[in-house]
Amino acid sequence: MIELLEQAVRIKSLSGHEREVANFLARAMTVFGYDRAWVDDADNVVGVIGNGSKQLVFLGHIDTVDGDVPVRYEDDVQGRKLYGRGSVDAKGPLCAFIQAARKFIGKTNDWQIVVIGASGEESAYAKGARYAITQFNPALCIIGEPSASGSVTLGYKGRLLAEVHMEQPSQHTARPGPNPSEYAVKLWNSIHTMSDLYNGMKGDAFDLLMPKLRDIQAGDDGLREWCDMFMGFRLPPEITPAQLQQRILTEFDALKANSTLDKVASTINFRGNEPAVKAERNTSLVYAFLGAIREEKLRPSLKLKTGTSDWNVVSPYWKCPTVAYGPGDSNLDHTPIEHVYVHEFERAVRVLERVIGTIVS
């Protein structure tokens, strides 16, 4: 069962370069007996089983972040583990979807099972998920992200990215007054203070507004001096990207108005505008997972994640019950020791088989 994942992680697939692994997985699904399998115009791999009127969509992703993690097996006291970039995030969950769904070839009744390995999830643009929105209309959706085989993820924080450029005519360093770098620091400090005030006594990370200074660079060509700053924000459900964007713009405009900055050349641009998502606990989809996990003699748990996923992208359009699930420890995402235990992967496949059986029977 692990062989499909091993072969998938051997194929490098950074965001924007997913077609090779997409073709491989499309061929694999064809061999498994899927009714249809193809690579679409967004470089997503798609496999379909059945032709019922209701769609059960499994949305995983095939792209990975950079970093070479040599593909290999190692053993420890807990069992055999497979190393490789994407073994956890998120070829592991996707391959578990593919393996579980194949059990229901010819057995879907009035359901259609759609397995999607989306491109570009690790980028800010989510090309694959945005294309899938236009192609499918699920009654139920399961997002492929590592939760551990005994857990179900019920939510992800929202995201907003801000790119700031501050610029003014060059001046002698002995001249009084801030330069663009100092203005950038002022803006960052005011935003961080705003976040601290909002967070107050909140204790749960899922409810916090979490700013992160991702990058800052400055330069001077003798005529103009500038500073570029890149900020990322993880948003709680109570704050929409539009609300935070307006608050940051207010801070930025106030800073520019009382500065020596070039008012036209100094700009701020936003992207990655995804609201937070949070599923209800008492849906039939959640109950199906809880029951399936208990059949593995595990005590199920429910999680809320501080990151984002393609769920954030599709949620405003696919207004259906949704959860995220997949084998692997999400603490290993993007790390140089990314790996998944073979027994963990196989257990997740069995959980998914039970869930699908509950839904389509």
Image (spheres, rainbow, N blue to C red):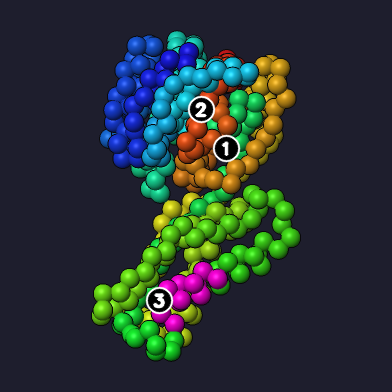
Q: Is residue 82 left or right of residue 329?
A: left
Q: Earlier in the sequence, mark 3 or mark 1?
A: 3
Where is residue 71 drawn, in percent x and y? 41, 24
Query: In the rendered image, which residue does mark 3 sit on?
Result: 180
Residue at the location (68% across, 16% down)?
295
Element carrying mark 1: helix
Amino acid type for the residue under numbered disc 3: Pro
Residue 342 falls in image quadrant: top right
Q: Earlier in the sequence, mark 3 or mark 2?
A: 3
Query: In the rendered image, which residue does mark 1 sit on?
Result: 331
Q: Is residue 111 left or right of residue 261?
A: right
Amino acid type for the residue under numbered disc 1: Asn
Where is residue 257 drawn, in percent x and y? 44, 84
Vertical comparison of 351 with 164: above or below: above
Element carrying mark 3: helix
Q: CA distance from mark 3 to mark 2?
A: 43 Å
Query: In the rendered image, which residue does mark 2 sit on?
Result: 339
Vertical comparison of 76 with 195: above or below: above
Determine crowd level at label 1: few under 14, some 14-19, many 20+ residues with C-alpha closer than 10 A. Answer: few
In the image, the segment drawn in magenta is: 178-189
In the rendered image, the quadrant that contains the C terminus is top right
Element carrying mark 2: strand
Where is residue 115 drawn, in percent x and y? 43, 25
Q: Is residue 144 visible?
A: no
Where is residue 255 drawn, in percent x and y? 47, 79
Amino acid type for the residue under numbered disc 2: His
Vertical comparison of 285 with 319: above or below: above
Residue at the location (39% across, 89% down)?
175
In this rendering, the count of numbered labels is 3
Residue 184 falls in image quadrant: bottom left
